[in-house]
Every structure is written in C-alpha cells, then in structure tokens.
Image (cartoon, coloured by chain):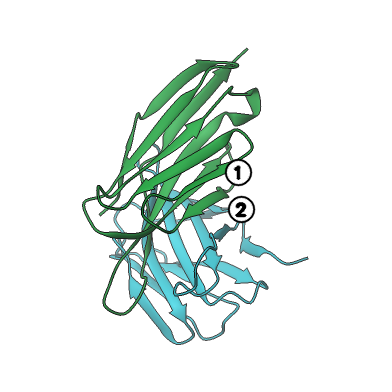
Chain colours: A green, B cyan
Amino acid sequence: QQPVQSPQAVILREGEDAVINCSSSKALYSVHWYRQKHGEAPVFLMILLKGGEQKGHEKISASFNEKKQQSSLYLTASQLSYSGTYFCGTEERSNFGNEKLTFGTGTRLTIIP
Amino acid sequence: DGGITQSPKYLFRKEGQNVTLSCEQNLNHDAMYWYRQDPGQGLRLIYYSQIVNDFQKGDIAEGYSVSREKKESFPLTVTSAQKNPTAFYLCASSIDLWRQGYGAFFGQGTRLTVV
C-alpha cells in the first residue's frame, strides 16, 4: 500500500518555504525522498533511518517520526531549481529485514519568479 | 561510468503482444525494482528482487513477469494479460536492502505505448 503524501500540489513564489508530508499505515524502517523533473528519472535526495532523525541537504531538510509513521520534507527559501515532483519512499519492517521500497503518489512543486 | 540503463526509451506495440523491457546496471547493486508511473498515481511497484534468482511481487504484479538470472540484469515482460499496459516504466537499483543509508538509482525509463 502506497504511503500518502500531502499536499498533492503546491505553487510557491521564489524564496518562500514549503513542507511536504508523507505518512504510512505500516511500521517503517526508513524513509527516502526523491525529486523528479518532468520527463526525467527520479533523483535520490536523502534517506532517514532512525526515529526522530533529521537530515539536511542545502536548504532542503527532512524529519522522520517513526512512532507516527510520518516524515516531512522542508524546503526553505525555495529556488526555481526546486521545481519538480517530490516522492517519499518507504521501506517496511519485516521479520526478515527490510523489504520492498514503496513510493507515495507525489507532490508537484512549482516555483514561480 | 556506473549507472543503470533502460532500453528502449520509447516502445510501441500492438495490443495482445508480449513485450520485454530491458534494465541493466553496472553498479554492483544487489536489489533491483520495477515501477510503473501513471499521471497522478506516483510510482507503483511491480516487482522487486533482492538477490539473483529470487524476486517478489509488488503491488501491481498482475500481467507482468520478470527474471533475475544475472545480478546486472532485471528484464520486465509486459504480457497480453496486462489490461492497461500503456505507461512509463522505471527500473531502479540499490545496494542490498539490508544495508543502511543508501538510496535507489533510477534508469531513464521506457515509455510503452500499446495501440
């Protein structure tokens, strides 16, 4: 079952901030974040492994609340290059170790000058 | 250069024909995946493989088949049983799912159109 992302789409002016949320109905081992430009392959941004872990990548950071089975991606002072569709990917826990990598439905981010 | 290659980029087939999409990686990754992308539905998992000669069904495996005879290769066959095969197909690979801290690398995708 796919994780749920919100919002589905967001339009920002350059310099504004955005938050993209990802939630799962299943216990998670990790959460991945990817960005896909139109017509291109998704590109890996970051992975969060531990509950409460936060990571940063330039002005893009993320948090992982393992207990709530949720993750959020934070984009601050957005730039035109941040436009694209953002996907969260989740690895579910199992008795045999990590298993399949399942992606959310995506959040389309549009940055306007 | 290391990477993951999908071919062809565009593929046209007549309804009722089976078609095989190629995915090759030279990253020495253990895990490989196939996803289908339709507008508004994100990436849906078709099949995945953690080691050679082993693979598991994803969320939408019906009408598809795969093989994993070599570590580098994970071809996907779209059979005539797939009711709506026209879509963008993405292959990905990652270091063993049991390791920590690594994301997945994607190929450039194959856009399949069935007429």
Q: Is residue B17 visible?
A: yes
Residue B73 or residue A19, whichever sits in front: A19
Question: Do callouts 2 and 1 mark residues in contact (Cβ within 8 Å)?
Answer: yes
**Depth check: A7 or B72 in front?**
A7
Q: Quadrant of the N terminus of chain B?
A: bottom right
Report, in whole angstroms, how far the alpha carbon at label 2 lies from the one at label 1. 6 Å
Whether residue B16 is visible here, answered yes or no, is: no
Name the residue beneath numbered marker 1: A40
The amino acid type of the residue labelled 1 equals Glu
From the image, tell me which residue sits under label 2: B108
Between A59 and A4, the one nearer to me in the picture: A59
In this rendering, the answer to whether A107 lies above or below B33 is above
B16 up-or-down from A64: above or below = below
Tell me: A41 left or right of A97.
right
- Residue B72, relative to residue A110: is it above or below? below
**In the rendered image, which quarter is residue A36 located in?**
top right
Position of B111 with respect to A3 (left or right) is right
Q: Residue at x 56, y 20 (%)?
A: A111
Residue lying furthest left in this view? A25
Residue type at mark 2: give it: Gln
Residue A63 picture location, percent across and down: 42, 43
Q: Residue at x 21, y 51 (%)?
A: A25
Q: Chain of mark 1?
A: A
